[in-house]
Image (cartoon, rainbow, N blue to C red):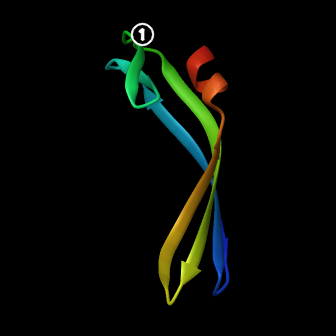
Amino acid sequence: STVADEKRAISYVLFTGTHTGPFIGFRDGRVDRVIPPTGRRVEVRHAHVYELRDGEVVTHDAVRDDLGTLTQ
């Protein structure tokens, strides 16, 4: 679901998928780890906050459950 006014929009979403390819983690712009595909389903919640100016998105911040994703 999404709520918005002229200055910001906030979306609360359910991220779902199946882990069919390698999951690549980066640290300092370099590959830090590669997790091979497991074939398992993933389901985690995310929140996204957008700052709007003149009807355009100028910033985006996300609150993700990365640990939840990795443990599934």
Amino acid at dot 1: Thr
What residue appears at the point 62 percent right and 15 percent down from the top-left corner? 71
What residue appears at the point 60 percent right and 73 percent down from the top-left corner? 51
With respect to residue 68, does 35 lie above or below? above
What residue appears at the point 33 percent right and 20 percent down from the top-left corner? 20
Instruction: Judge from the rendering whether residue 28 lies leftward or rightward of residue 60; answer left or right.
Output: left
Q: Quadrant of the C terminus?
A: top right
Query: What is the secondary structure assignment of the residue under circle 1?
Result: loop
Instruction: Judge from the rendering whether residue 14 lies leftward or rightward of residue 24; answer left or right.
Output: right
Q: In front: 22, or 24?
A: 24
Q: In front: 61, or 40?
A: 61
With respect to residue 44, does 61 lie above or below? below
Instruction: Please indicate, yes or no, whether residue 25 appears anywhere in the rendered image.
Output: yes
Instruction: Please indicate, yes or no, whether residue 19 appears anywhere in the rendered image.
Output: no
Q: Quadrant of the N terminus?
A: bottom right
What residue appears at the point 49 percent right and 22 percent down from the top-left corner? 41
Q: In front: 36, or 41?
A: 36
With respect to residue 49, does 27 lie above or below? above
The residue beneath circle 1 is 38
Question: What x and y, as percent, mark residue 30?
Answer: 37, 24
Instruction: Judge from the rendering whether residue 66 lies leftward or rightward of residue 55; answer left or right.
Output: right
Which residue of the protein is positioned furthest toward the front in this rendering? Answer: 28
